[in-house]
């Protein structure tokens, strides 16, 4: 039986969008590069080399300074090297959401402890750009419609990684949560969905209360 690590690497290695996107929107697919292929092998072999069940944490979609570069959700090149111990050749530019998530991971007990329990992904595991800036999968109704089958397929493939169906965590209490609830009704993925404020919102608008939100996250994650 393949390990979760092998299943995850196979999933990301095969990710592709083979249909046209709305005009002006482009997809980020870092998994086609040799450096990212090396990184995802190293990362998932280190933290997911087993067949234990994990709880899913879902973001929106990768951004151009975090998962859109490294291939690891909410993990910028700095966190990848310093917190996860995986050297990389990327420009060491911080990504706000990654900074917050790794504050949470550190407070939870570190990457080994955290990733032994949780698997982070996104409703769309590939990110998007428009005019060189991050573009969310739900920012365009046309894009969301085009991605519907792709997103559903990605969910079903990831659930086979041994993801628990009792509960998942959704990062973002607005549109991301709305879309996830609709998907959950259609696909019957999870019994319960627990929403948390999105890291980007915290870092951009509640920076002075950052420690409070780290505690909020850790307390919520530990209750399960």
Image (spheres, rainbow, N blue to C red):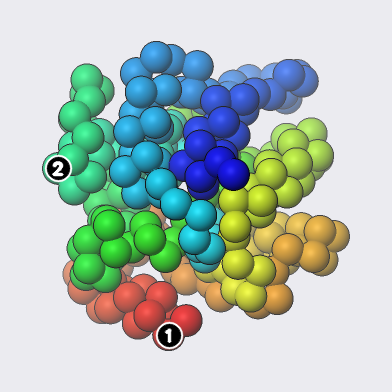
Q: Is residue 224 left or right of residue 184?
A: left
Placement of the N terminus among the 4 image quadrants: top right
Residue 177 on image: x %, y %: 63, 64
Residue 122 vertical placement versus 224 (above, below): above
Dividing the picture into quadrants, the one containing residue 86 is: top left
Where in the figure is residue 212, as x and y percent of width and height?
A: 26, 78
| Residue position for label 2 | 82
Foreground: 220 or 23? 220
The answer to whether any part of residue 25 appears in the image is: no
Q: How many marks?
A: 2
Q: Check the image and report above or below for 223 versus 51.
A: below
Badge 1: few (under 14), some or many (20 or more) residues near its Cα, within 10 Å?
few
The residues tagged by marks 1 and 2 sit, at their Cα atoms, a distance apart of 28 Å
Of the numbered discs 1 and 2, the one sitting upstream in the chain is: 2
Q: Residue at x 51, y 47 (%)?
A: 4
Q: Is residue 123 left or right of residue 131?
A: right
Q: Is residue 176 visible?
A: yes
Label 2 crowd bin: few (<14), some (14–19), many (20+), radius 10 Å: few
Q: In which quadrant of the rendered view does residue 10 lie?
A: top right
Q: Which residue occupies 60% across, 57% down?
A: 162
Q: Is residue 84 above or below residue 184?
A: above
| Circle 1 SS class | helix
Q: Which mark is residue 104?
A: none
Give the structural element (helix, strand or loop) at label 2.
Answer: helix
Badge 1 vs badge 2, beta-carbon distance below 8 Å: no
Nearer-the-camera pick, 56 or 125:
56
Q: Quadrant of residue 69?
A: top left
Which residue is under mark 1?
223
């Amino acid at each position: 039986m393949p390990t979760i690590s092998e299943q995850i690497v196979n999933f990301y290695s095969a990710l592709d969008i083979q249909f046209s996107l709305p005009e002006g929107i482009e997809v980020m697919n870092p998994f086609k590069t040799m450096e990212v292929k090396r990184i995802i092998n190293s990362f998932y072999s280190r933290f997911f080399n087993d067949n234990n069940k994990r709880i899913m944490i879902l973001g929106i979609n990768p951004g151009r300074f975090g998962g859109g570069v490294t291939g690891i959700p909410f993990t910028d090149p700095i966190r990848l090297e310093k917190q996860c111990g995986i050297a990389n050749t990327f420009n060491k530019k911080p990504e706000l959401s990654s900074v917050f998530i790794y504050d949470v991971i550190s407070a939870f007990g570190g990457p080994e402890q955290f990733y032994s329990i949780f698997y982070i992904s996104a409703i769309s595991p590939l990110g998007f750009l428009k005019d060189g800036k991050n573009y969310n999968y739900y920012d365009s109704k046309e894009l969301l419609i085009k991605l519907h089958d792709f997103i559903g397929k990605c969910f079903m493939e990831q659930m086979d990684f041994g993801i628990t169906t009792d509960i998942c965590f959704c990062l973002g209490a607005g549109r991301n949560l709305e879309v996830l609830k609709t998907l959950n009704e259609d696909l019957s993925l999870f019994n319960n969905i627990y929403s948390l404020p999105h890291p980007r919102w915290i870092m951009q608008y509640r920076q002075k209360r950052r420690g409070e939100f780290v505690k909020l996250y850790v307390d919520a994650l530990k209750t399960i």
